[in-house]
Amino acid sequence: MKTVTSITITPPFAVQKVAVPLLWQHTYDVVRRLPAHVSILYPFVPEPDLPAATERLRDLCADVTPFDITVAGYGEFPQVTYMQIEPSDALTVLMQQVHAAFPECEPYHGTFGKDVPPPHITVGVFNSKNKQRQATFPAYEPMTFTVDRLHVNLGAENRILTWLVRDVVMLGR
């Protein structure tokens, strides 16, 4: 069984209440094995390298002040619908710093090349544009929350197993 790791932000319960029912309605098992989340880096390092990499991440995050982000509305990629994260300089800088600190970790296996998609919370994955267009997503009030930690996760690639939070890395000192 091949394991895979990731770094994510897990939004609070208020966001989960909107996102999780949509995940169960509009995605497949692989997406539902983590709570609704914002990916910072996927895949992260191989499992044997995780302790040392997490310490590097902890050092990097010690100088990052917690910040707020707002989830508002929906956006789309081809065959993916997501809850939008409003532009956030702090989140952009954090992602750039994490990616620069781990250049051996190619975001999304290089699927998007250098154009990594903007931060988002996936709530729908479709096998056709037509199915994506037919899906309905409820309106919700914008939700702002403080990002003060990152989750380092471990899962099994292509297996029906729940991902586990292996470590929590706090932002700031």
Image (cartoon, rainbow, N blue to C red):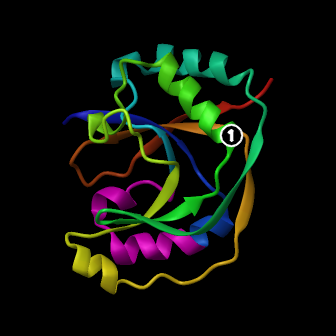
Is residue 55 toward the left or the right of residue 142 in the image? left
Residue 63 in percent (x, y) is at: 75, 21
The amino acid type of the residue labelled 1 equals Asp
63 horizontally vs 167: left or right: right
The answer to which of 154 and 11 lies nearer the viewer is: 11
Disc 1, SS: helix
Q: Which residues are magenta?
A: 18-37
Which residue lies at the image location 58% right of the left edge and 66% below the top edge? Answer: 16
Magenta highlight: main SS: helix
At x 59% / y 73%, what residue is drawn? 17
Characterize the local packing of mark 1: few (<14), some (14-19) or many (20 or more) Cα atoms within 10 angstroms.
Answer: few
Q: What percent of the width, then of the height, locates residue 132?
A: 31, 76
In this orientation, does residue 18 appear?
yes
Q: Quadrant of residue 25?
A: bottom left
Report which residue position mark 1 lands on: 89
The quadrant where residue 106 appears: top left
Q: Is residue 168 visible?
A: no
Q: Quadrant of the N terminus?
A: top left
Q: Quadrant of the C terminus?
A: top right
Front residue (pair 162, 59): 59
Establish if 148 lies above or below 130. Answer: above
Query: Could you tell me residue 68's position as x and y percent?
Result: 76, 49
Residue 5 included in the magenta stretch of the image: no
| Residue in front for this viewpoint, 71 or 112 | 112
Q: Is residue 35 one of those drawn in magenta?
A: yes
| Residue under the point 38% across and 34% down | 5
